[in-house]
Amino acid sequence: MNWIFAGCFVLYGLANSGLSALACYLPLSRLAYTFFARQEWSATAITDRPTVNMLGGYYSQQQFLRNLDIKTDPASSDKPSVMDEAYKEFIMQLASWDTRRDFWLQTDYYKQRMVGNSKADAAMLDELINNIQFTPGDFTRAINDNVKLIAETAPDANNLLRQYVAFASQRAASHLNDELKGAWAARTVQMKAQVKRQEEVAKAIYSRRVNSIEQALKIAEQHNISRSATDVPADELPDSELFLLGRPMLQARLENLQAVGPAFDLDYFQNRAMLNTLNVGPTLDPRFSDLSLFAYAGRTGKT
């Protein structure tokens, strides 16, 4: 019996010692975690649509193409604005998995943390890709689109977010320029075809007109009609009765027509002017200098 109680006291003493040790261990473990656990910081930037000035020459050239389209298809005026389409491309790049992956692959931040093991490096790359998060806004709640980047330190998070926004904006600019170049080339081909059709129509009308006067002149010479034999204005006479104008007037009309050549309307000359502009080709900026300003009002915080 005494042994049993003695054993109980020993166990109780050990229990008390264990509780004391545990009480000391918990604060120490928290302190150790604070020092050795990986810390994470996030930087967030709000994004918004660009202004006309931000897009520079891209805006004016894209608008030039749109004006040409509106002329042939008035319904095309209902398209989203140039700024809206540029912003759509920007946020698509900002949220793209490929853009995030390619961004990390070229950063020193990723390269310095590689361990030389393909699986470990791939896992780290996947984690970094997920550390860039784009969140669409909510118009009904007045919340803007935003992008967040998580890194180990506040300066890293801030700098990497700026770099990523610039990287995504450069990709957006490249894609927008490619689309502009393609649309410009297509519009040039269309305008060349349109101008050629107008020239062919004008030349056909000219040839027919010359032939009509030449035939009328032959008839007038055969019948020796040396003066006008009709009171009907020349422009109102059908081709079959032109010979009534007489040889002198017909000869003068033929020489005048040959001197002037085919007749073109105002629409043709406008198309020629536009074609000359299109033939020069677009001026492409490899990088929109202010496109990265789509993102602003950045903030940094510990995660």
Image (cartoon, rainbow, N blue to C red):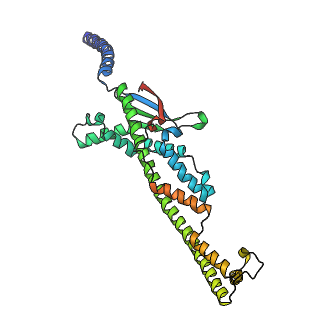
**Residue 65 in view in this figure:** yes
Residue 128 occupies quadrant: top left
Q: Residue at x 46, y 34 (%)?
A: 293
Q: Residue at x 61, y 51 (%)?
A: 78
Q: Is residue 131 shown above or below 257?
A: above
Q: As drawn, is 250 to the left or to the right of 41?
A: right
Q: Quadrant of the N terminus?
A: top left
Q: Position of residue 199 (x, y in %)?
A: 55, 69
Q: As drawn, is 160 to the left or to the right of 114?
A: right
Q: As drawn, is 25 to the left or to the right of 197?
A: left
**Residue 49 in view in this figure:** no
Q: Is residue 212 shown above or below 51?
A: below
Q: Nearer the viewer, residue 246 or 161?
A: 246
Q: Quadrant of the C terminus?
A: top left
Q: Residue at x 68, y 88 (%)?
A: 224
Q: Residue at x 37, y 25 (%)?
A: 154
Residue 25 occupies quadrant: top left
Q: Position of residue 42 (x, y in %)?
A: 41, 29
Q: Nearer the viewer, residue 23 or 255?
A: 255
Q: Residue furthest left?
A: 116
Q: Position of residue 178 (x, y in %)?
A: 43, 51
Q: Nearer the viewer, residue 74 or 298?
A: 74
Q: Position of residue 160 (x, y in %)?
A: 36, 32
Q: As drawn, is 280 to the left or to the right of 83?
A: left
Residue 298 occupies quadrant: top left
Q: Nearer the viewer, residue 74 or 276?
A: 276
